[in-house]
Image: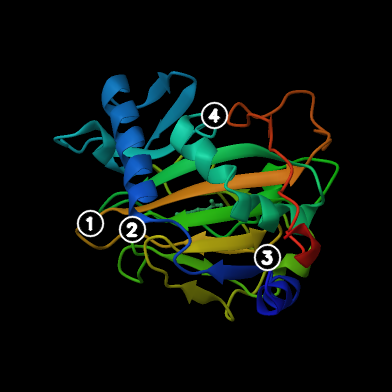
Amino acid sequence: MLSENERKDFADKGFFLRPAFASTTTSSAMLEDVVAICRAAEGAGVHEGTLIMPENNLSDRVAPSAEERISKIFRLHRRPVFRDFIEDPRLLGLVTELLGPRVDCFLSQFIFKNPGAWGQPWHQDSFYFPFDHTPQIGLWLAISDATLKNGCLWVLPGSHREPVHAHVTDRRPGANLGYVEIVDHNMSEAIPVLIQAGDLLVFHSHLMHRSMDNQSDGVRAAMVFHCAKSGTQIRTPVDAPVNDWMALPPAPTPRTRTDD
Ligand SMILES: O=C(O)CCC(=O)C(=O)O
């Protein structure tokens, strides 16, 4: 289910890109659902089991619509459009090849990076995942094009081989809740991930990555899922409120010539 190049990129660099993975219909349905959530909740809070987080540095903006003040919406993967996506046989094939035959989706977040929103500092996702297995797999689906101007992701190729580094709290006054930063590593070899709406970035949870501020006039949106091997144990007394463990179906068995 993975090409040779994808397998090699994941092993060598800690990520690979699947261009044109999602249709415009899927991306639009995701966007429509999260916009409806933000408007129903009239901004940040809880709605139908989802958690809606504000964009702190845009909190005093007078915005015509609720979603223009939102940063992230968590716990989406049981909703039909998101569940259909994460249970797509192409995704199941990909994550089971990387993690083993049975996999859970435990985290999902839609990211609205509105004009003026700040980027998320350098981090490794495993810092947020105090689990007994590593790695987890991140699936970052571009809902809009991601450019240098609108705050695309940056990654440090090969950094997935690093242990989880110390992370310090994001020191910018007004930074979003939960933002942390790696300050003890050289990031000079980092590269931008310039991708188009519908492209999927697949990455290792130790990969160091960040995003930049949105300096454009348009929103830079993305939908991110995280998957772990089934049976993963949490090493903290209480799980993070953003997590919601859901077993995924097994990947369909590839057809062989004798099936015909
Ligand atoms: O898309 C972004 O702005 C940051 C996303 C990110 O770093 C993450 O999902 O771990």
Q: Quadrant of residue 77?
A: top right
Disc number lying in front (3 or 4): 4
Q: Which residue is mark 4?
A: 78
Ligand 1 closer than 8 Å to label 1 CB: no
Query: Which label number is shown at residue 138?
Result: none
Q: CA distance from mark 1 to mark 4?
A: 28 Å
The image quadrant where one finds the N terminus is bottom right
Mark pair 3, 4: CA separation: 38 Å
User: Compared to 59, does 7 lie above or below?
Assistant: below
Q: Which residue is mark 1?
A: 218
Point out the frontmost of discs 1 and 4: 4
- Residue 164 makes an appearance in the image: no
- In the image, taking residue 76 as reference, residue 241 lies left or right, namely right
Judging depth in this view, the residue of 7 and 164 nearest the camera is 7
Q: Mark 2 Cα within 10 Å, few/some/many (few <14, many 20+)?
A: many
Q: Residue furthest front?
A: 260
Q: Which numbered disc, 3 or 1, marks the residue that appears first in the sequence?
A: 3
Give the mark, 3 or 4, whose residue is nearer the N terminus: 4
Q: Hey, which quadrant is residue 256 in on the image?
A: bottom right
Secondary element at tag 2: loop
Numbered disc 3: secondary structure: loop
